Image (cartoon, coloured by chain):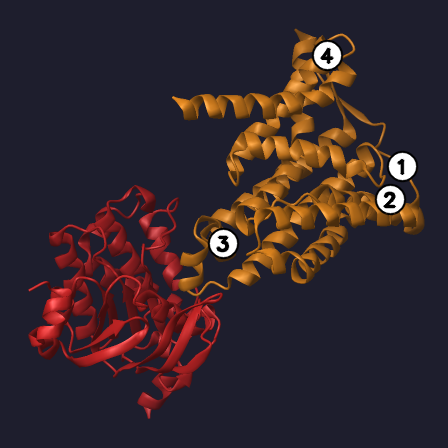
Chain colours: A orange, B red
């Protein structure tokens, strides 16, 4: 029983990170209408910036986090301005090719500049853990979960309680209607895409502490984020939270109870995409 | 002197402005829809634009809003050139657009839809509570439905939300695109009466409609649009009596 509870807790903690990456992706897909295949690369940028801050300036990743978030927001906004903006009315295939190419570009740029080695960040709290009764919780993991929960809460407040958030939801629900009541749709897209990238970068900072930074570190997180937003239904933010928890906990269960589960757990999200699509088509067929 | 001050912030203005379109040409990609459209609505006037499907009525209104960029011609709102201006600027200058198909935010409540209508200008925000009262007075049904998601309303109620949302910005010119589409005769009557009431408060109204009979009865003046050109204009009553109009649009 203790093992089961411990497994659930581990899964839940992991889901915070997933939700952070996936909610950013959901914002790009839902508001801007762009399926951003380069989403994981913004996570990678965040991870490398955190590593660089720690290695060269001796700044703890958690302290550099706000600066990194703002910097990657700017990078995302710039990306929107020079590329995404010009394909908004293009066929979907062109949009996908653009973001896919962007991802390859950023990945190889990182490879060229920094090499393929994984870079680790050392922090004093890395090996710490908390003891809650029989449960043991890794310090960084708990920290990452707390931060993710805080940020997602903030995102929720912005989307549902502020004028900017209402504008974002309006644009997501009806672009033309939003335009005709005077919402500057282009500006909303720029901000939404910037925030989307910043959320990925924040996740990247946490990943640098929990795992490492490398040119391809974003890939698996982006894939899982895709699985999550497919499960949640495109652009559904509360759905993203539930789907993240489902993925995190499922992975943890596989890790604990399936022999050789460490390797299998990374395949869980494939199963979830598969299951969702089959269920949807089954429902649709009825 | 206060009048002059008022003109500098037209969105908070209850006084209608003039809308003038001269020699407008526009289209989508290579398909030209409008060839030479000239029309105007004087401050406080109720103008109808009638014509068959594909005559260019909706495109004309989209060009006014800045959603479609004209290839030639000139559009002014209260004397300010808005040809090729961004939609957000056109709204800020005092244009309210009730689009064809309503274009509401389906997953938001009626109240949220209305609030968003006032969100884009400081002047409209400052008077939002007052304007909301006016919209509810115009459409009591919207007050009853305030907490309901817009996507779950009937077609007529959705049309009320679309009109109300545009009014929340306190426009000086209201352009309305096919409000009767898909509505019962009774509901059409309700919406048209509301437009008449809005116009009576001084707001310039430009109504694009296929319901020729009703709109000609309501309008001070009207234009007939055919194949992207204005082919006739006159008072509503004169056009209603015109044999050619009667034959083409009223099948009489």
First in sequence: mark 3 or mark 4? 3
First in sequence: mark 3 or mark 1? 1
Say whether residue B200 is left or right of residue B124: left
Disc 3: which chain? Answer: A
- The residue that appears at 63% across and 37% down in the rendered structure is A22
Q: Residues within 10 Å of mark 2 (few under 14, many from 20)?
A: many
- The residue that appears at 83% across and 27% down in the rendered structure is A128
- Front position among marks 3 and 2: 2
Kindly report the distance in space between the C-alpha atoms of the residues bearing marks 4 and 2: 31 Å
Tag of residue A256? 4
Q: Is residue B88 above or below residue A31?
A: below
Same chain for the residues at labels 4 and 2, yes or no?
Answer: yes
Tags 3 and 2 touching, CB below 8 Å = no
Tags 4 and 1 touching, CB below 8 Å = no
Res B145 visible: yes
Secondary structure of the residue carrying numbered label 2: helix
Res B143 visible: no
Secondary structure of the residue carrying numbered label 3: loop
Return the residue at label 2: A51
Q: Quadrant of residue B166?
A: bottom left
Disc 4: which chain? Answer: A
Return the residue at label 1: A120
The image position of residue A109, as x and y in percent, is: 85, 50
Kindly report the distance in space between the C-alpha atoms of the residues bearing marks 3 and 1: 38 Å
């Amino acid at each position: 029983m203790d093992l089961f509870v411990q497994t659930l807790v581990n899964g839940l903690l992991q889901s915070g990170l997933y939700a952070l990456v996936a909610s950013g992706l959901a914002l790009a897909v839902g508001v801007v209408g762009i399926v951003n295949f380069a989403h994981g690369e913004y996570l990678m940028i965040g991870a490398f910036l955190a590593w660089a801050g720690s290695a060269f300036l001796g700044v703890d990743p958690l302290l550099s986090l706000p600066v990194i978030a703002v910097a990657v927001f700017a990078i995302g906004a710039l990306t929107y301005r020079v590329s995404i903006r010009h394909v908004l009315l293009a066929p979907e295939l062109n949009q996908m090719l653009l973001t896919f190419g962007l991802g390859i570009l950023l990945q190889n740029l990182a490879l060229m500049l920094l090499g393929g080695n994984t870079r680790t960040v050392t922090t004093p709290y890395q090996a710490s853990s908390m003891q809650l009764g029989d449960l043991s919780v890794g310090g960084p993991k708990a920290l990452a979960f707390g931060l993710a929960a805080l940020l997602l809460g903030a995102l929720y407040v912005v989307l549902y309680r502020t004028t900017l958030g209402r504008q974002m939801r309006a644009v997501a629900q009806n672009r033309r209607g939003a335009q005709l009541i005077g919402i500057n749709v282009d500006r909303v897209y720029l901000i939404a895409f910037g925030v989307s990238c910043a959320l990925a970068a924040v996740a990247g900072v946490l990943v640098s502490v929990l795992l490492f930074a490398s040119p391809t570190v974003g890939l698996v997180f982006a894939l899982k984020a895709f699985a999550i937003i497919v499960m949640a239904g495109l652009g559904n933010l509360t759905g993203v939270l539930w789907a993240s928890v489902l993925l995190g906990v499922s992975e943890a269960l596989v890790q604990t109870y399936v022999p050789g589960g460490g390797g299998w757990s990374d395949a869980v999200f494939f199963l979830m995409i598969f299951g969702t699509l089959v269920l949807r088509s089954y429902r649709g067929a009825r | 002197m206060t009048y002059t001050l008022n003109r500098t912030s037209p969105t908070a203005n209850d006084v209608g402005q003039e809308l003038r379109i001269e020699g407008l040409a526009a289209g989508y990609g290579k398909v030209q829809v409008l060839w030479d459209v000239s029309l105007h609505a004087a401050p406080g006037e109720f103008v109808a634009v009638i014509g068959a499907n594909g005559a260019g009525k909706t495109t004309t209104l989209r060009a006014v809003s800045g959603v479609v960029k004209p290839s030639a011609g000139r559009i002014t709102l209260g004397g300010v050139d808005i040809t090729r201006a961004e939609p957000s600027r056109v709204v800020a200058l005092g244009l309210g657009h009730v689009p064809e198909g309503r274009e509401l935010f389906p997953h938001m409540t009626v109240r949220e839809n209305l609030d968003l209508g006032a969100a884009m200008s400081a002047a409209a925000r400052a008077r939002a509570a007052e304007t909301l009262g006016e919209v509810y007075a115009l459409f009591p049904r919207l007050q009853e439905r305030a907490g309901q998601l817009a996507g779950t309303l009937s077609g007529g109620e959705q049309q009320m939300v679309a009109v109300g949302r545009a009014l929340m910005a306190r426009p000086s010119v209201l352009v309305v695109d096919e409000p009767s589409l898909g509505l019962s005769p009774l509901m059409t009557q309700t919406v048209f009466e509301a437009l008449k009431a809005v116009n009576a408060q001084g707001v310039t109204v430009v109504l694009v409609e296929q319901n020729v009979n009703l709109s000609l009865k309501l309008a001070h003046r009207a234009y007939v649009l055919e194949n992207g050109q204005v082919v006739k204009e006159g008072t509503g009553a004169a056009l209603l009596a015109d044999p050619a109009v009667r034959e083409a649009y009223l099948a009489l």
